[in-house]
Amino acid sequence: MKSKLKLLAIIGSHRKNGNSYLLAKKVLESIGVDHEIIQLADSYIEFCNLCEKCLSDDCVLEDGFNKILEKMKSADGIIFAFPKYVLFASKFICFLERIATIQHMREHMGYKIAFKNPDYRLFSAKKPFCIFVTSGTGKMEKENLQIVADYIEGLGLELVPHDLPPFVGVNVKAGDDAGEVLKNTEGIEECRKLTEKLIVSIENGDSGHTSFLKS
């Protein structure tokens, strides 16, 4: 029976319909779960200007950010799929920074004011997420991947780790040309297994997060 859950995949690549997108699409279609895929390459995402108006309202910048954030809030679980560039795609970092700024403003009641609201959460408790990383070589240092995972967890989400190294997510060798990732059947299979683990964690209310991730 098809799951009634809804997954959201956010593709952090600068390239539309690139390998990160094709990987997520292939995995989600193979599982058959209800899902939506958002490519940041389709959206204009501005940098936060620290206006502090998000203290009481949606972000006032006129771009695609608010719509994506609302979809994140309504999804049961989130997949972040992004490529390795020098470190990470700058548009993806900008997007995460926007979310983090809103959370900081509302938790601390402003940019410069002391801590006032420790119970504020932007997302529902333990909304789980997992990570796919594509690169030409299929390698990203665990320490760098951990930085991304920690940052996303700081937004109030909960990491569902992979069962194999580097555990934080799945490194997938994708080549340089769009479409090459589809030849990597082993990488696709590992991402499928992680996505199924994400679904189980949603159904069980348990992320499966373990302490060895940072060891």
Image (cartoon, rainbow, N blue to C red):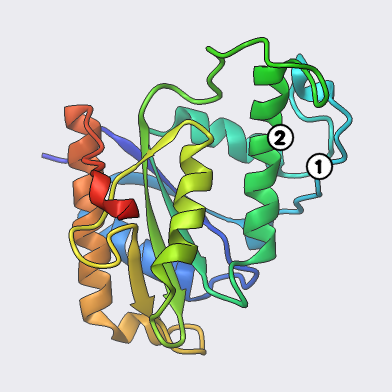
Residue shown at 76% from the left, 53% from the top: 44
Residue 99 can be seen in this image: yes
Q: Is residue 105 above or below residue 12?
A: above
Identify residue type, mark 1.
Answer: Cys
Residue shown at 64% from the left, 37% from the top: 100
Callout 1: 10 Å neighbours few (<14), some, many (20+)? some
Count all numbered tags in the image, as a single digit.
2
Front residue (pair 121, 150): 150
Q: Is residue 181 above or below residue 65?
A: below
- Which element carries disc 2, helix, strand or loop? helix
Q: Which image quadrant for residue 34?
A: top left
Point out the residue furthest to the front here.
Answer: 215
Callout 2: 10 Å neighbours few (<14), some, many (20+)? many
Tag of residue 48: 1
Front residue (pair 112, 188): 112
Q: Is residue 179 above or below residue 134?
A: below
Q: Are marks 2 and 1 in contact (CB under 8 Å)?
A: yes
Q: Tell me if 124 is positioned left or right of 169 in this view.
A: right
Q: Which image quadrant for residue 187?
A: bottom left
Q: CA distance from mark 2 to mark 1?
A: 8 Å
Question: Considering only order in the chain, which callout, 1 or 2, is on the residue closer to the N terminus?
Answer: 1
Identify residue type, mark 2.
Answer: Thr
Q: x, y (%) of residue 117?
A: 62, 11
- Which element carries disc 1, helix, strand or loop? loop
Q: x, y (%) of residue 173?
A: 37, 82
Residue shown at 34% from the left, 53% from the top: 214
Residue of label 2: 101
The quarter of the rendered structure image containing the N terminus is: top left
